[in-house]
Amino acid sequence: MPFMRASGVLLHPTSLPSQFGIGDLGLEAYRFIDFLTDSGQQLWQILPLGPAGKGNSPYASYSAMAGNPLLISPDLLEKKGLLEKAHLAHLPELNAETVDFEQAISTKIPMLRKACSNFEANATSFERQEFSEFCDRNAYWLDDYALFMALKDVHQGASWNHWELAIAQRQPDAIEQWQQRLSQDTFYYKYLQFEFFQQWSELKRYANQRSIQIIGDIAIYVAHDSADVWAHPENFCLNRETGEPTLMAGTPPDYFSATGQLWGNPVYNWENLQRENFEWWLQRFRSILNYVDLIRIDHFRGFEAFWAVKQGETTAMNGEWIEAPGEAFFKALNDKLGHLPIIAEDLGTITPEVEALRDRFELPGMKILQFAFGDGTQVEKRFLPFSYPRNCVVYTGTHDNDTTVGWFNQLSEQAREAVRFYLGCTSSEEIHWNLIRLAQSSVADRAITPLQDILGLGTNSRMNFPGKAVGNWGWRYQLSALTPQLRDRLKAITETYGRTPILQTSES
């Protein structure tokens, strides 16, 4: 689906400033939206919003449809009367530059439990009705998720396939017994989702009122240790006896890793999904469309063919490509939900068949400027602006890339000279602004820049190192970072290249 000419910023909410050790949906999120508006942006791109599991990755969530409770703002809970100011006082000294996930959990969870107790004891009849309607509306995923999380607590965090056999296999008697035993705990997990989506919906409404659209992110795979796999094992390639994946997801060796990326997620049983008319996937899209305006599909190529690695392998090198029913899936999606505002993450090993699937449904792909410079091969030239179609989204880099400053500094001198020559600049001092200008000036309908690049930060500020198991997802920006000078410079570039809503309105 072609989009209007616009630009925006990539920033996950965990990277926002806050006093609680992790970014949240409170005041600083609203201030960030104001910065986007005042600098002429129209898009805010985020990563998946789900509760992060192993490694704190938003791409390895305990649920494909739930929200991350750590993003709930205690300040907003206090304003609702669910916490007292004393609950927010005497906080430990928390790192303002990076997320310490363990410390953030130990700081915020007691507050969330207190808010839940206060809600249960003191909620008005209207609030109780709102909560009940939320639970009924989302029962198709919320019931399983709340019970799953409560069961994980009882089993001290163990993966579901290590629970007692009866509940691991969801035998009806076991489900009924555990539901009764854990009713208070499941109420808590449902309440957290209620608060999360109330806060998120208010924030999204504020963004939309200021002409900011939110680009959400659907991870193609879900974590093995998730409510989705536990509740719907028939949709995944699993060993029926052990519950372990028989085939694991990943990518073959590529730009990011010489041994490929072994993600460990179970791959889909596409035959069963297709027999069910892709209903589980349709529910995922219905769910996310309630809370975002556009959707980036992570690892789009997996809908045409996916890299599958047998259980027991320690790298992704010894896998194979298996075809997926991508055309049937996207046809069902369009038939049931209409022509959706989807962006296809078409990076990695892209074949003519993948491109044909993308183009068949008029989905804009992604162009990464950092990939355009290197050894000069034809594969990289497709990322240079002269080869772009209008129906695409250009990025200086993504959450998986180094920052532009870090990337440039690690190039050879010969490669750096080639970049400077292409950009028409003699100095490397503001390489990030030169790449931002190149993205904004391109014919691509949409241009997205990670906030780290707007701030001109180095490698220490990158969000993720693909293939690295720990130490990712923690970067945060400082309260003083979004200066008037930064706002005005970004706005001037955006106006110059016709990406502001005011210019588009006057031209139409």
Image (cartoon, helix red, strand yellow):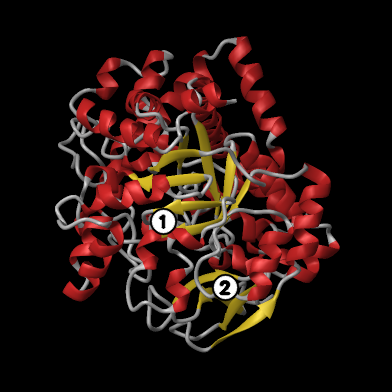
Q: Nearer the viewer, mark 1 or mark 2?
A: 2
Percent position of residue 278, x then y = 78, 57
Count of numbered labels shown in the rendering: 2
Q: Which mark is residue 230?
A: none
Q: x and y percent of residue 76 in the render?
A: 39, 20
The answer to whether residue 95 is above or below residue 462 is above
Task: Identify the residue position indicated by label 2 in the image.
Answer: 350
Query: What residue lies at 41% left-to-right and 36% top-to-bottom?
Result: 71
Q: Position of residue 159 (x, y in %)?
A: 51, 63
Amino acid identity at mark 1: Ser
Percent position (x, y) of residue 229?
63, 61
Which image quarter is the C terminus in? top right
**Mark with earlier residue (1, 2):** 1
| Residue 182 visible in the shown view | no
Marks 1/2: CA distance?
25 Å
Toward which corner of the image does residue 193 lie, by quadrant? Answer: top right
x 40%, y 45%: residue = 440
SS class, disc 1: loop
Asked where in the image residue 80 lies, by quadrant, the reply is top left
Within 10 Å of disc 1 (Cα), the crowding (few <14, some 14-19, many 20+) is some
Disc 2 secondary structure class: loop
Q: Nearer the viewer, residue 282 or 42?
A: 42
- Residue beneath the point at 50% across and 44% down: 446
Q: Quadrant of residue 426?
A: bottom left
Which is nearer the eye, 187 or 49? 49
Amino acid marked by disc 2: Ile
The numbered dot on residue 57 is: 1
Residue at left offset 51%, top offset 25%: 211
- Crowding at dot 2, Cα within 10 Å, few <14 / some 14-19 / many 20+, comes out as few
**Residue 81 seen:** yes
